[in-house]
Image: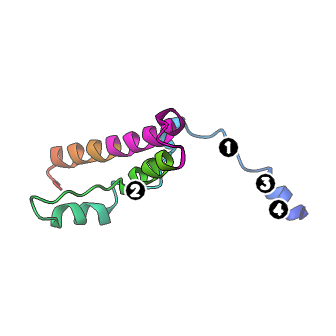
Amino acid sequence: MDPAIAKEKGKIDFTKGSVNEYKFYPDNPTSEYNKSKFASKEPSKYYDPCAQSAQMSVRCLEDNNFDRDMCHEYFKAYRECKKEWLRQRRQDNFNGKGW
């Protein structure tokens, strides 16, 4: 290993922060992109800013012969994404920003 890399590696503190700061899903439901996509959709259309997490859950089910117990973490990640999205929408509506 390069000594310079080893020296920098020692400065990293992986214990900083809390578990609440970590995201366990690939989507970014509170991004400006998702806000604009949601705002510009037609009233009868469905838009899911957590679509990638949902797709991963379905793929896991398909790969594991639809055994839900094998895909628990994927379902949990999707629920966390949806909770973050709804929490942000409520906060924006409360602050008058709206979606």
Closer to the eye: label 1 or 2: 2
Q: Measuring 76% from the left and 50% from the top, which residue is drawn there? A: 11
For label 3, the crowd category at 10 Å Cα-Cα, with few meaning under 14, some 14 to 19 and many 20 or more, is few
**Residue 30: horizontal and vertical position, in percent?**
33, 54
Which of the numbered marks, if any, corresponds to residue 5? 4
- Return the residue nearer the eye: 36 or 73: 73
Q: Position of residue 13 (x, y in %)?
A: 70, 44
Q: As shown in the figure, which amino acid type bears the numbered disc 4?
A: Ile
- Disc 4 element: helix
Name the disc covering residue 28, or none: 2
Residue at the disc numbered 3: 9
**Residue at coordinates 30% horizontally, 47% vertically from top-left?**
85
Tag 1 residue: 14
Dot 1 falls on a residue whose secondary structure is: loop
Residue shown at 49% from the left, 35% from the top: 72
Q: First in sequence: mark 3 or mark 2?
A: 3
How many numbered tags mark residues here? 4
Mark 1 to mark 2 CA distance (whole Å): 23 Å
Q: Residue at x 29, y 61 (%)?
A: 34
Give the main secondary structure, helix, strand or loop, of the magenta stretch: helix
Disc 4 to disc 2, how far (Cα)? 31 Å
Screen quadrant of the C terminus: bottom left
Nearer to the camera, 75 or 5: 75
Question: Whole-Å distance between the Cαs marked 4 and 1?
Answer: 16 Å
Q: Tag 3, which secondary structure?
A: helix
Q: Count residues near mark 4 (Cα–Cα under 10 Å), then give few for <14, some for 14-19, many for 20+.
A: few
Name the amino acid, label 1.
Phe
The part of the chain drawn in magenta is 63-83
Vertical comparison of 4 with 66: above or below = below
| Whole-number angstrom distance, CA of label 4 to CA of label 3 | 6 Å
